[in-house]
Amino acid sequence: MAFVRACALSELEEDTPKRVELDGTPVSVVRTEGEVFAINDICSHANVSLSEGEVEGCSIECWLHGSSFDLRTGKPSGLPATRPVPVYPVKIEGDDVLVSVTQES
Ligand code: FES
């Protein structure tokens, strides 16, 4: 699985998602609860950027209709979204946040 650099760890603010594009895939990188997560940036309910939503614990809330997605699994915790959003493996190397978008975890 190919990891590519998404951003610097030091530029990630706690609970503030950062949108990046990796190999043409929009990804929201989130630092929260002492970990870094990578989730596809598009809500599974409609074409809305999840990185514009709120992070709470290990979930990110879609700002449009309020479904929350678990950053570890991508699963929605409630309607209107019913389908999960892809999540991706993350590796930290020094100050580099590396994400593999070629394999969903
Ligand atoms: S667009 Fe995200 S919950 Fe509707």
Image: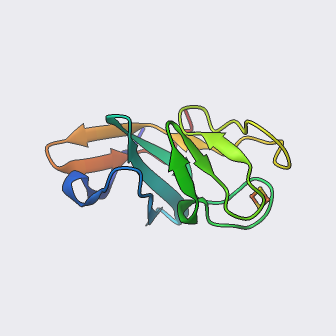
Q: Position of residue 81 (x, y in %)?
A: 81, 48
Q: Is 59 situated above or below 17?
A: above
Which quarter of the rendering shows the C terminus? top right
**Vertical placement of 72 versus 17: above or below?**
above
The foreground one among 41 and 100 is 41
The residue that appears at 53% across and 61% down in the rendered structure is 51
Horizontal side of 12 relative to 59 (left or right) equals left
- Identify which residue is drawn at 65% across, 42% down: 69
Query: In the rendered view, does 21 fall on the left or right side of 7?
Result: right
Count of marks overlaid on the render: 0
Q: Position of residue 42 (x, y in %)?
A: 65, 60
Residue sitting nearer the eye, 2 or 28: 28
Where's residue 30, x and y in %? 42, 49
Q: In the image, what residue occupies the spot 84% across and 42% down?
A: 82
Residue 21: percent from the left, percent from the top?
47, 66
Quick check: 77 above or below 9? above
Left or right: 67 with respect to 18? right
Give the image quadrant in which the ligand numbered 1 is located.
bottom right
**Res 74 quadrant in image:** top right
Residue depicted at x 47% and y 46%: 38
On the rendered structure, is 81 left or right of 3?
A: right
Quarter of the image that includes the N terminus:
top left
